[in-house]
Image (tube, rainbow, N blue to C red):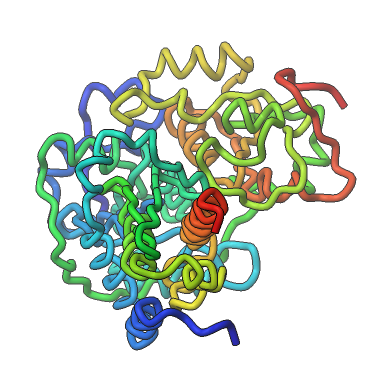
Amino acid sequence: MAVASDTAPQFAEYAHPERLVGTDWLAENLGEPGLVVVESDEDVLLYETGHIPGAVKIDWHTELNDPVTRDFVDGAGFAALLGAKGISRDSTVVIYGDKSNWWAAYALWVFTLFGHEDVRLLDGGRAKWEAEGRPMTTDEPEVSPTEYPVVVRDDSTVRAFREDVLETLGTLPLIDVRSPEEYTGERTTAPAYPEEGALRAGHIPTAHNIPWARAAAEDGTFKPKDELEAIYRGGVGLGADQPVIAYCRIGERSSHTWFVLTHLLGLSDVRNYDGSWTEWGSAVRVPIAKGSEPGSL
Amino acid sequence: MSAALPPALEEIRDEFLALGQKDRLLLLLEFANELPELPARLQGHEDLLERVVECQSPVFLTTEVEDGTVRLHATAPRESPTTRGFASILVQGLSGLSPDDLLAVPDDFPQMLGLTEAVSPLRLRGMSGMLARTKRQVAQRLAAAGA
């Protein structure tokens, strides 16, 4: 029982416009049966300060990650989580969050691992909704728990592991979406971010540096398609069928780029290496390049 | 077992530990809302404060030692309530201590609040950074005063 797509003209040119909704659309469709709005933020308390009426919260640290193994929750864990949030397998899920939808895109990517079909982003995220003076509330939504099915997580289609990167190194293009400082090896963390424990600095040899934020406009919405084309196709020469792997530090910023390449530009085979730099930069005997050039093997 | 906590920090810790996970988050939000404004003489002069780079949002703090007690001032943006909550806990828990008592506060105090599960260890690092910087500032002020 999918809710109708947002047919606003600014989305029409994207490869999969049904993956985005605007704030107007969301305001009109709040409360629509079959629609669940999810807030996913970097700050674990931001939702509690006020959220879109009816929205539920999903926290990436404490709910999408397995508490023991460095991995996402499994099928049973995902089913329990979504069931508790009142999401059904056929729900239309619209995700929004802070920081130009970093974490919202990450959550959307995790939903994709479990094959949840109708999952969309609110273009511009929380900041745009707030800036437009739209309603926010601290009232807890009334959630009717559902029976979400246990679905085996698909780790092969949109997810890449260290082994995949090693095997395809030099043959598949890699996109490093971190800041230039992290890419060149000046530092291992995003500017103004805490150390997250990589032992070496630099990037995976041959990777192109396209910081994720280049895909976002000032107001946090996605840039128009022709500008995105220029950045990704022009910059790296990515064709529509060219398989590509994106990575960052822990896989969150590269989820944003994954969304752009997959749903806005329509590339057919984009994988997110979520182990990213915190794994690669600490792994034994993997090649590393420093400096502003991609480097060779 | 770590060293004994000063009474104000102990009270804060006990408040958190008495609650379930979800209520611990709400208590942290209460702290966030209670973070006092910077004193007027510091407002607009954030450059005089030290940036806490361990925090994911712009957080600045500074300490003053006067008549044998420490005052901690901190500022963090409204859209970063978790960080504001951490700052507020330290402002409330550390202000008024003697420099020696402040320096004796265990470095792992942030881990004693029972927030690891509700907030995640990674996010708690911001609070550890604030505590470490506060202690270092106070130690430097003591050294500069020739104490």
Work out which quarter of the rendered image holds the C terminus of chain A and state it.
Answer: top right
What's the residue at 39%, 48% (across, down)? B61
Residue drawn where x is 25% and y is 58% of the image? B35
In the rendered structure, the answer to whether residue A9 lies left or right of residue B87 reads left
Residue A141's quadrant in the figure? bottom left
Q: Position of residue A150 (x, y in %)?
A: 48, 72
Location of residue B84 by image quarter: bottom left
User: Observer-nearest residue: A103 or B131?
Assistant: B131
Q: Residue furthest front?
A: B146
Query: On screen, A146 above or below B35?
Result: below
Q: Position of residue A229 (x, y in %)?
A: 48, 16
In the picture, measured across the screen, residue A16 lies left or right of residue A234, that is left
Image spot of residue A190 (x, y percent): 56, 38
- Residue A1 is left or right of residue A283, and the answer is left
Q: Nearer the viewer, residue A8 or A213?
A: A213
Residue B123 at least partly seen? no
Residue drawn at point x = 54 percent, y = 48 percent:
B144
Query: Going 32% across and 29% down the picture, which residue do you hit?
Result: A221
Quarter of the figure that contains the N terminus of chain A: bottom left
Residue A159 screen position, x and y as percent: 62, 48
Observer-nearest residue: A240 or B83? B83
Residue B11 showing in the rendered view: yes
- The count of marks equals 0
**Between A135 and A148, the one nearer to me in the picture:** A135
Q: Is residue B19 above or below residue A264?
A: below
